Structure formats: structure tokens, C-alpha cells
Image: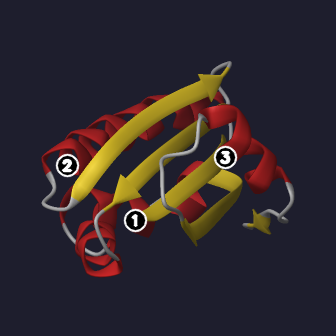
Amino acid sequence: MLIVATELHVRNFWKFIPFVKYSTRSTKQAKQAEGCLHVWVGNKGWRIGYTLTAWKDKASMQHYRNTGPHKEAIQQIANLSKQYKTLVWEAEQLPDWKDAKAKLDEIAFKQLK
């Protein structure tokens, strides 16, 4: 199975409402996506959003990533976020969030202007 963990920092308070809109729509899309095995969304205050998803295969994840509300959200990422990171890896079983976050903490943020 393919695991994807993300961390996104909302640019400022005025971007929070649009971020929630895109996040809610993307989460709904993921939960209905063919090949999606697990969806978890969390946060640390209003400024930091996290996701942990599991996919049957890479093709399922890429179809989700490149279509619908998630594609729209990605097109807005520089407007909504000042930095984010995404980690993708293969696993035999779904990690708990603590283990996924530890892996995510090992990689650098992509800084946005």
C-alpha cells in the first residue's frame, strides 16, 4: 500500500477560511476515491494542517491528486500556504499518526513565496 503524509502551514489568518474550504472538499473527495484505503485529517491550532492517507496503489493516489477538488487545492497552495511538505512511501500496514509524523519531521519544508 502507498502511504502519503502531509503538513501544511496556512499563510495567515485571512487564508484560513479558504484553506478550510479546499481541505473539506479534498477530504470528501479522498474518502470517495477509488483505491483510497484510509483518510485522516488533523491540525495543530488553526495554522497547521496534517493529512495521512493510504492508497491501494500509486495510480489511485495520482488520480485523486490530479483531479477534482484536490487539483483545485494544489493550484491554490502558494496562495494559501507559506510552507508544506509531503512524504510518500510504501508500507505493509497503515502507520499510526505518531510514526507517520516522525517520518514527516525528517524531511524539509518546501518554502513558498
Q: Which residue is mark 1?
A: 1
Q: CA distance from mark 1 to mark 2?
A: 19 Å
Q: CA distance from mark 3 to mark 1?
A: 14 Å
Q: Position of residue 28 (x, y in %)?
A: 21, 39
Please tell me how many numbered marks the rendered image carries.
3
Marked residue nearer the N-terminal end (2 or 3)? 2
Q: Position of residue 4 (x, y in %)?
A: 51, 59
Marked residue nearer the N-terminal end (1 or 2)? 1
Identify the residue at horizontal 57%, vertical 68% (top origin).
88
Q: Above or below — where is 41 with respect to 84?
A: above
Q: Quadrant of the C terminus?
A: bottom right
Q: Is 100 on the left or on the right of 108, as rendered?
A: left
Identify the residue at horizontal 43%, vertical 34% (top origin).
40
Of residue 21 and residue 70, the one placed in the foreground of this image is 70
Q: CA distance from mark 2 to mark 3?
A: 22 Å
Q: Quadrant of residue 102?
A: top right
